[in-house]
Image (tube, rainbow, N blue to C red):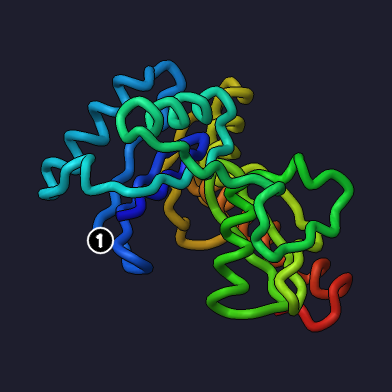
Amino acid sequence: MLLAIDISNTNIKFGLYNSTTMQRHWVVSTVRQRTTDEYAMVLNDLAHHAGHQLTDIDDIIVSSVVPPLTPVFQELAQRYFGKEAITVDHTMDLGIKYLIDNPWELGSDRIVISLAAHHLYGGPAIIIAFSTATTFDVISAEGDFLGGAIAPGLVISAEALSSAASRLFRVDLTPPRAALGKNTIENMQSGIIFGHVGLVQGLISRLRKEIPGVT
């Protein structure tokens, strides 16, 4: 079986695949201070609870946007599985051309999202991912990476607002009744949520004008 590990700034996602079918998946919080042994214990407990053993795993692939944790999981693959983890980056032969200034700056999360989108839906296309950051990735009809945009995600936008403004506080990220808020909570929810919607719509509009035929 293949173990796919997606390491993001907020969560780490594990997917256990048999051929092309995902059999199990788990999500844990990203903790930069955890050691190789601690993550191995977490993974072993999750797999055991689902009726699997670590010995069931034949290959491991890692996508990481948290540089301090990349070697942690590479070591995990070596010590607990006796394997070299496949680590996704721009040097892999994925059939993608990176038509950008500095391909080495591109996060592996954006690489795999773009590859999956082209495989599933074709191109040209705009791929939007809502995570710690909200990313916009543009691919050509051939699947080549043309560029994109990065904006603060919903959660960190809300956290920045409450931490930087003395009289504001954390609010639930649920849509208010209307854009016109009648109290502080509704005002903040309107600005954060509807503001993010406007950001997404605005960038889609601009990208479509710059890349004819993109959807």
Q: Amino acid at mark 1?
A: Gln
Instruction: Tell me if I can see residue 188 in this picture.
Output: no
Q: Residue at x 79, y 57 (%)?
A: 98
User: What residue did someone put label 1 on?
Assistant: 23
Q: Residues within 10 Å of mark 1 (few under 14, many from 20)?
A: few
What residue is drawn where x is 42% and y is 16%? 33
Determine the residue located farthest toward the bottom in the rendered image: 213
Q: Is residue 43 above or below residue 128?
A: above
The quadrant in which the C terminus is found is bottom right
Along the line of sight, which residue is nearer the eye, 67 or 181?
Answer: 67
Residue 70 shows up from this direction = yes
Looking at the image, is 20 positioned above or below residue 11? below
Kindly identify the residue that appears in the image at 32 percent across and 59 percent down: 17
Against 201, is 168 above or below? above
Q: Secondary structure at mark 1?
A: strand
Q: Quadrant of residue 123?
A: bottom right
Q: Quadrant of residue 43?
A: top left
Image spot of residue 178 (x, y percent): 52, 62
Residue at x 67% of width, y 61% of height: 200
- Viewer-proximal residue, 26 or 132? 26
Q: How many marks?
A: 1
Give left or right: position of 65 versus 146: left
User: Relative to residue 202, is residue 101 drawn left or right?
Assistant: right
77 sits left or right of 101 in the view: left
Q: Position of residue 115 (x, y in %)?
A: 61, 64
Point out the image quarter for the N terminus.
bottom left
Q: Which is nearer the eye, 54 or 41?
A: 54
